[in-house]
Amino acid sequence: MLVSIVVPVYKVEKYLSNCIESILQQTFKDFELILVDDGSPDNCGKICDEYARRDSRIKVIHQENGGLSVARNCAIEIAMGDYLTFIDSDDFVLPHYLEKMVNASQVNGADISVCGIVRCLSSDSLADIAEDSSRNGTEVFVDDKMEIFFTTKKINTTAWGKLYRSFIFKMIKYPIGKYHEDVLTTYKTIHLANKIAVCDYQGYVYRKNEESIVNESYSSKKWHAIEACVERAEFIERYYPKQKKYAYRAIVYYCNQILISMAKSCVKDKESFARLQKLYRKYLWFYIFHKSAFLGKCFALISFVNVKITYSLTRLFNV
């Protein structure tokens, strides 16, 4: 049973060896590791090649910088595994990660297995994180899988922290040229999966990298998240109409995030204000009357009246 591990690599020189070492120390040994050097300008490419010389299970792709989606898609094209898993190169996994995930999938006949996440400091390495490998609890979701995705934290939007049957990515590709590509993709993988097994084992270690995409200041690409949420909501309305209110709620959440980002970056744009105003007027009530943070609801409600007021208040109080 072969697992293909996909690791896109870009400007993570100080974290890359820790990521690769954590994979090589897995208790489950039947894997191939595909490192995609996405035109990284530092020494990442050399580090990848050095590891490939030391371990025949490692394959390296060198390409011009095309972004995360291109890197993942290129790796998927050459992957030979029965399963696929994605690991961000500034993150790492604990020793029993693959073993627990494969076991959860096989025992429960699940097309996707999910594990818990450990958050670490920027300076942490594999040696700093204690693993509890005794945790073996698993919940299995079938007809309620999409509801669980939208209403709990058991299945999150990220590509990482999951093990997929490889057939899923014969029908899905990551969208090229888009940021927040996981918002456009993960719900489709859930739709295709017959069952999803969620483990209580915490084996994926997420590092908050201040240089990562999600931590960038405002730019027009922030709108990709809202565009993705709108596309997702249309899909959910068609195939899972009972869950559409949750999909709509996410649109308002990202509207809040964009407006805050604009204010903090001192960006005033009439077209963006108009787009946000229209979205708040259309979707606000799905956000207000469901479980959401109180401050988020207040922010959205004021924005419903006039986004420029919220923008000014955010600038004034540095929300």
Image (cartoon, rainbow, N blue to C red):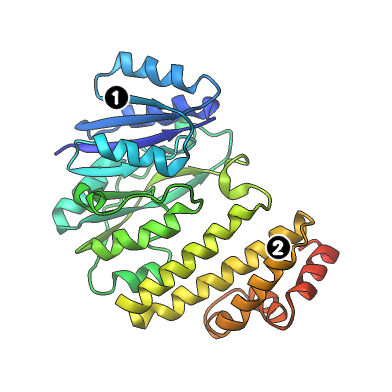
Q: Which residue is drawn at 49% across and 32% down?
A: 65
Lateral position of residue 305 relative to residue 87, left or right: right
Q: Can residue 25 be seen in this view?
A: no
Position in image of residue 207 (x %, y %):
52, 42
Q: Is residue 290 visible?
A: yes
Q: Which residue is drawn at 31% across and 43% down?
A: 85
- Disc 1 packing (10 Å; few <14; some 14–19; many ≥20): some
Q: Is residue 53 above or below residue 277?
A: above
Position in image of residue 254 (x %, y %):
58, 66
Q: In the rendered image, which quarter contains the N terminus?
A: top left
55 vs 217, nearest the viewer = 217
Q: Residue at x 78, y 73 (%)?
A: 308
Q: Is residue 113 above or below residue 300?
A: above
Residue type, label 2: Ile
Residue type, label 1: Ile
In this figure, which residue is indicated by the disc labeled 2? 260
Q: Distance between the residues labelled 1 and 2?
A: 42 Å
Asked whether disc 1 touches disc 2, contact meaning CB atoms under 8 Å apart, the reply is no
In this figure, which residue is indicated by the disc labeled 1? 58
Lateral position of residue 11 relative to residue 34, left or right: right
Position in image of residue 187 (x %, y %):
35, 63
Lateral position of residue 205 relative to residue 79, left or right: right
Position in image of residue 88 (x %, y %):
44, 39
Q: Single out the residue that lies furthest toward the right.
A: 316
Circle nearer the N terminus (1, 2): 1
Element under label 1? strand
